[in-house]
Image (cartoon, helix red, strand yellow):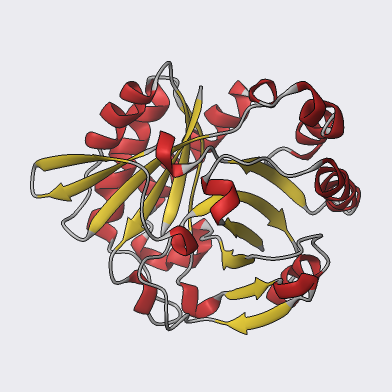
Amino acid sequence: MRFMMLMIPKGYEQAAPGTMPDAKAVAAMMKYNESLQKAGVLLALDGLHPPSMGARVSFSGGKPKVTDGPFAEAKEVLGGYWMIQVKSKEEAIQWASRCPGSDNEVIEIRQVQEFTDFPPDVQEAAAKFPEMQAKSGQR
Amino acid sequence: MRFMILVKATKDSEAGILPDEQLLAEMGNYNEELVKAGAMLAGEGLQPSSKGARIRYAGTKRTVIDGPFAETKELVAGFWLIQVKSRDEAIEWLKRAPFKEGEVEIRQVFEAEDFGPAFTSELREQEERLRAQIAAKH
């Protein structure tokens, strides 16, 4: 099973453009990343620049509307993520518990939808999806 | 530049209601365009937050909270990782997404060079080794 671990750092919703993580925190996190990697569970990981450098596109009535960040109403935003391959949700929770998180941080664990999770009619409509995933891939 | 596109949850996605055949077909075509343009790096949908959990950190203490989580609009239902030349190009791609409602958030991904000297050669080596090992696994 694949799980996404979503890092939600409280306060990041208000971070100024160009805000960088603390080198000490990054060093601790890299040790943790290495332990995930050594265990063979790590599939991908990334950090995200603050929302003040981002944008949102909303689709009310199918019409795209662009709003530049920061997003005043946001109570929590994503700071980064890990994609892991484990045997159960419990194993994912154990891995997240070992993360050197600080008091302002929360990790949300969410299972990734696999093609085989879908009913037959949805699988048929999304038939090209596995091939598409194979063609894209991280570079 | 890499951007992560966060698809925000809706009442339907949180209720586990899957998109209908038409939207799936439109999304398939849109994904195909992304792939053809060489912009698509990854894309996934997430199961509803009711099947997920949160871990809260306080010193060495960890608190596990089972889903669902209340703030539907703040939750992520899926994502794309895309490679484009600018933030504007990312926005243009997303304007063309076949959504009839809802919202996506566009966020630039940190690259090693963004960190400057704080990202020491030792840390950089470690990061490169990690990524190479991940890539070799796929």
Position in image of residue A109 (x %, y %): 39, 39
> Within the image, what quadrant is residue A19 found in?
bottom left
Lateral position of residue A132 relative to residue B108, left or right? right
The foreground one among B94 and B102 is: B102
The foreground one among A136 and B56 is: B56
Lateral position of residue B75 relative to residue B12, left or right? left
Position in image of residue B69 (x %, y %): 36, 51
Position in image of residue A14 (x %, y %): 36, 79
Position in image of residue A70 (x %, y %): 47, 82
Count the marks.
0
Lateral position of residue A3 relative to residue B37, left or right? left
- Which residue is at 37% across, 66% downward? A76
Which quarter of the image is occupied by the C terminus of chain B? top right
Q: Is residue A31 visible?
A: yes
The foreground one among B46 and B86 is: B46
Which quarter of the image is occupied by the N terminus of chain B? bottom right
Q: Is residue B9 visible?
A: no
Q: Is residue B120 above or below residue B53?
A: below
Q: Is residue B2 above or below residue A45?
A: below
- Which residue is at 21% across, 48% downward? B56
- Which residue is at 41% across, 74% downward? A74
- Which residue is at 82% across, 34% downward? A126
- Report the residue that reaches farthest toward the top: A87
